[in-house]
Each structure stands twice: as structure tokens, then as C-alpha cells.
Image: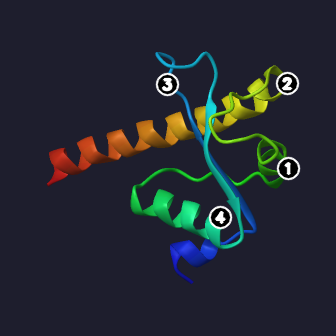
Amino acid sequence: MNKTEKYQRKEAVALSYRPENHDAPTITAKGKGKIAEAIVSKALENDIPIQEDASLVELLGKLEINDSIPDELYQAVAEVFAFVYRLDQDTQQNKKTRKIDG
């Protein structure tokens, strides 16, 4: 099973947070079926972390592209961004370790 197959799902939502442009994270892409697969595939191609949370995707999927995350979802979305931040930190540390070892 390749990574794309592992992450095949019926629905996907992509988030972005740029504090200089928005006060809250925004929906940058969303879709079901083939569109969801394309979102996941694009994320994998660009080494963008994927967090699976079906109930959060269901709630976020009700929003429109470019909508800001509503206050009641801040905590759940903050946990996703914390997960991504930890992954990014781990990746950076692994790259530094490889440079030292290599």
C-alpha cells in the first residue's frame, strides 16, 4: 500500500494559517471523493503533514473555501497545528542529525 492509498478518504479539508493576512486559520481547499484524493495527493507530494480526524473534517467541510475557522473550532484546529509544528520540528532535527552524521 503506498502513501496515497493509505490516505484515501471520502472527504478532505486543507487549512492554512497566515497571521499577517487573517486572524484565524482558513480553509484553503476541501472536497469529497476524487477531489479529496487529489488534496491528499498534493499534500503528500509537497511534504505537507496530514492529520486524520473524521469528525473535525466533517465540521470543517461545512465551511466554504477562504472561510476563517469559527471560534468554537479553535481548540480542535490548534491541536492540528500543534501536531504539524511538532512534525516540522522533528523533521528539522532529523535533517540536522543527518548532516552531522553524513
Does the image show residue 57?
A: yes
SS at mark 1?
helix
Would you say 67 lies left or right of 29 here?
Answer: right
The answer to whether residue 7 is seen in the rendering is no
Mark pair 2, 1: CA separation = 14 Å
Q: How crowded is mark 2: few (under 14 residues within 10 Å), some or many (20 or more)?
A: few
> How far apart in space, not on screen, are marks 4 and 3 (Cα)?
23 Å
What's the distance in space between the residues labelled 4 and 2, CA to CA?
A: 24 Å
What residue does disc 1 label? 55
Q: Earlier in the sequence, mark 4 or mark 2?
A: 4
> Residue 28 location in percent, x, y?
58, 42
Which of discs 4 and 2 lies nearer the camera? The answer is 4
Mark 3: which amino acid? Answer: Arg
- Say the numbered circle drawn on residue 36: 4
Q: How far apart are marks 4 and 1 (CA)?
A: 15 Å
Query: Image quadrant of residue 60?
Result: top right
Packing grade of label 1 (10 A; few <14, some 14-19, many >=20) is few
Query: Which percent across, then down, holds residue 98?
Result: 23, 51
Residue topped by disc 2 = 72
- Left or right: residue 76 versus residue 78 is right
Q: Quadrant of the C terminus?
A: bottom left
Which residue of the protein is positioned furthest toward the bottom in this rendering? 1
**Disc 3 target residue:** 18
- How far apart are the alpha carbons under marks 2 and 3? 19 Å
